[in-house]
Amino acid sequence: MSLLPTPQTLRSGEWMTPRQVSAVTHYALQTLANYRSTGVGLPYIKLPTGRIRYRRADVEALISAAAAA
């Protein structure tokens, strides 16, 4: 996990919710939750509100790697 994003970067589209990641990767929300709890998969941050966010660049890298394989 990394430093917390600012409210401006959260609104900029640089960060994605688990639901958005699920929609583009076709991973179930529960699968993303399981990956977080076991420490595998995409890096993420947990906001003070308890909400989870993924960096868009990490999601795009995952998709690119899967397409190249």
Image: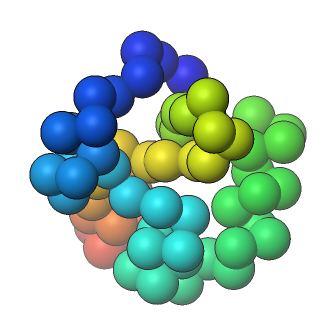
Tell how many labels: 0
Picture layout, residue 26 above or below residue 6: below
Residue in the picture at 15% in, 52% down:
12
- From the viewer's side, name the closer residue of 44 and 4: 4
Q: Quadrant of residue 64?
A: bottom left
Residue in the picture at 33% in, 28% down:
5
Task: Please say whether residue 50 is visible from this viewpoint.
Answer: yes
- From the viewer's side, name the closer residue of 69 and 65: 65
Picture layout, residue 49 above or below residue 62: above
Residue in the picture at 84% in, 40% down:
38
Residue 7 image position (x, y, % from top left)? 28, 37
Residue 21 image position (x, y, % from top left)? 46, 69
Task: Please say whether residue 40 is visible from this viewpoint.
Answer: no
- From the viewer's side, name the closer residue of 14 and 60: 14
Q: How is the image coloured?
A: rainbow
- Which quadrant does the C terminus fall into? bottom left
Lateral position of residue 57 relative to residue 23, left or right:
left
- Which quadrant does the N terminus fall into? top right
Q: Quadrant of residue 50?
A: top right
Residue in the picture at 54% in, 74% down:
19
Lateral position of residue 18 relative to residue 24, left or right:
right
Picture layout, residue 32 above or below residue 23: above
